Amino acid sequence: MQYGYFDDEQREYVITRPDTPLPWINFLGCEDYFGIISNTAGGYSFYKDARLRRLTRYRYNNAPLDTGGRYIYLRDDDAPSPTSWSPSWQPTRIPLEEYECRHGMGYTTIRSRLNGITAHMRYFIPLGVNLEVWELKLTNLRPQDANLSVFATIEFCLWDAMDDATNFQRNYSVGEVEVVDGVIYHKSEYRERRDHIAYFACSETLAGFDTNRDAFLGAYRGFDAPAAVESGSLANSITHGWQPIGATHTRLRLPAGGSKTIIYLLGYHENPSDQKFDPPGTQTVNKHSVTPIIRKYLQEAEVETAFIQLQAYWDGLLARLQVHTPDVHTDHMVNTWNVCQIMAAFSFSRSASYFESGIGRGMGFRDSNQDLIGFVHLLPAQARSRILDLAATQLPTGGAYHQYQPLTKRGNNEVGSGFNDDPLWLVLAVAAYIAETGDWDILDQPVPYDNAPGSEESLYHHLKRSMQYTLDRLGPHGLPLIGRADWNDCLNLNCFSDSPGQSFQTTTNKDGKVAESVFIAGLFIRAARDMIQMAQKKEGESAVKAYSMAIALMEQAVWQAGWDGAWFRRAYDDLGQPVGSRECTEGQIFIEPQGMCVMAGLGIRDGRARQALDSVAERLATPHGILLLQPGYTHYYLNLGEISSYPPGYKENGSVFCHTNPWIMIAEAMLGDGARAHDYYLRINPSNREEISDLHRCEPYVYAQMIAGREAPTFGEAKNSWLTGTAAWNYVAITQWILGVRPELTGLRLDPCIPPGWNGFSVQRNFRGHRLHINVYNPQHVSRGVVMLKLDGKQVVGNLLMLEPDGADHQVEVWLGQ
Ligand code: BGC
Ligand code: NOJ
């Protein structure tokens, strides 16, 4: 069953009923101020850091689902016994006669009708400012005038979301607000060390307001039935501690057929620390610099202009790569939503969504590096600074903090380091950046280690240390030691955790001189191939030789100890026993090394890559995607760690862990099987799963981190949507390997590997200042093989385009055939 549809022209996903299986959300904001909004206006907002600068409160895990949001109530003041409802359905959940939510690029609209009143709400964050706009347009469809009360509410979070959810003995006493000229200012903790406030403003004269939650809701009531909405008047309460909220009341008389637009602003503002108060010496918030911003955006015309600017911004981003293929699901994802999801993952890493609380996790080192590979063509300058930020958290050993805090950009000590794959992802990200931009200069940028001034070395040296980090940590079989874990955070081979509540991420590990990772071996080789090309530019032959030698030795180790006969093994545990081998009773085959080793080029010539991928097809592929491992672990293994803490079929223990699926798509494309590559692509493509939304449950327009695996009772059910490396990798798999328009360090490779049934497809793409119009023809219905390539009508030898830097538009024609 479907709960909506794709509106391709508007680039929106349209949700046609409010009771979706789970809240279906959107992300607002692309600079410093962000919001998450569900299809019923739930969600929360924050400035830069979802933990340390949280503006509004949200309760995960609550019943009913998705409480806390940007709520509006309408009250029919004429009715004999006044009725009220929420035009976004939540929180009152009073049935609406019409409902439609449209999630677009950086905005969400909700339109509904009840009792002859239509409400149209538009939520977005204008570019260049730290506020969100809620624009509400009400229309009276009745034959007579309507007297309405409009209430708008938000619940302030006391900034630090962790503290807010735990430290009640203090927080119930620190809440403070000011209400001036109809604007509610939230200034908790401003009297001491904060230099920032939040505000909630309305374009209309207020009939009343509340800032104390109890005053608004009434004791023991919820947002579904506030006493103040029922009675039709607010108490003008000023909260002292407890729960500061912003609630406003506007009375309207709407003539028959008439409309009225009301604008609400929720914003964040900082004052210089020596100008916090006005007059100085008082405790009154200085509002000089914020007032003009509020005034400006309370005007309809300004809001419209800001919205047009936001749309133009997204037009520009999306235009950078557009495709037209015979497959609608490919087009849906590549042309809009996959990009939108990549932007969210780039902005928040894995920190804030409806599954990530914004509290526990900063920006992941490996995560952000992988996000970059799908992001770099969108905003190369931002990609560049992210790379430099990440590299600056690298440790002098070449290792990396697993996460850093977005506000401070410092490595997160609580989670520490020792995930031995981490540093290698930096190499892939930098290579992707240079391939896209041609900006080799980035390698010369001085970057510190652990942010310590004076420790700067060139980025290229950072990459060398990344590589050396692996070589300094080889195990008994000559394979890389796994450390705390590699890509699979839950394969904790040195952890041996036996007490409940210990964190698999941070519990002190064994020194770990035995457990090795075949996956890191593959990743190392994959990275070393890029390093060779960079070394050629930076150092010359001797460095090139050194990396070639390192590749050769690593390959040898893989074939000697990492090959299981029909697939790549996963690892060796602390006892030196193989993991992911037919010798094991459970967890005989894992997806990760099959993908990574083939992507590294292992076994392509001698057929072993084919064999590994056939094993994947046989043992791991399901109609809902490719499983992470088989068979799932049925009980907890001390020597394997968190992976075996999950019931079989969930998360790392044998779900379809979507992030890894594109690695197999890429591997299949490398081997020339376009039908299989695209078939795998479709199995997890959310648009292709739209019709099974009752089973899938998550949004049909973005990837989820996992889909429950074959052994799970809920096989096919998705979880953890939005913030996952799946977004970037699927984008790379489809655009660069299946459609085959692939930036390489030396130029743009054209090497499609498509289902043979396709007649062709086209791609419009920006590349190093050029605009390329690429048409691919497949008259002989092959999967792969470029027989002719033309640039502006002239034949090119081979399939690599090296363009003169003339910044011009170019026609590229590609003929596939035998
Ligand atoms: C999850 C992993 C995640 C890790 C780190 C684990 O519980 O299963 O997917 O990467 O936590 O937060
Ligand atoms: C999610 C984490 O964010 C990512 O870094 C990790 O690779 C996967 N889980 C697999 O464990």
Image (cartoon, rainbow, N blue to C red):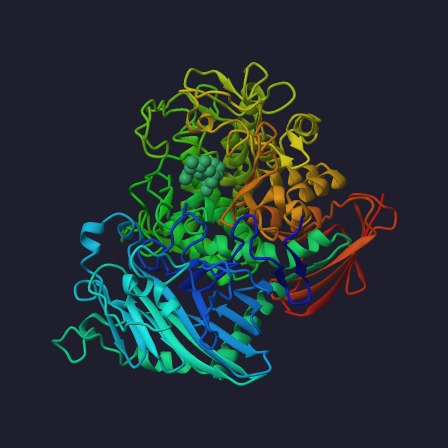
* Residue 412 occupies quadrant: top left
Q: Position of residue 705 (x, y in %)?
A: 53, 42
> Residue at left 36%, top 53%?
447
Residue situated in front as seen by the camera: 134 or 89: 89
Location of the C terminus by quadrant is top right
Residue situated in front as seen by the camera: 796 or 113: 113
Relative side of 574 to 220, left or right: right
Q: Position of residue 507 (x, y in %)?
A: 31, 30
Which residue is the extreme one toward the left? 281
> Residue at left 40%, top 60%?
225
Q: Position of residue 710 (x, y in %)?
A: 61, 29
> Residue at left 18%, top 58%?
173
Q: Eyeballing the image, is 319 above or below 179?
A: above
Viewer can see residue 504: yes
Which residue is the extreme one toward the front? 80
Residue situated in front as seen by the camera: 809 or 1: 1
Q: Eyeballing the image, is 534 above or below 340?
A: above
Residue situated in front as seen by the camera: 180 or 400: 180
Relative side of 702 to 387, left or right: right
Image region (quadrant) for ligand 1: top left
Relative side of 235 to 419, left or right: left
Relative side of 362 to 480, left or right: left
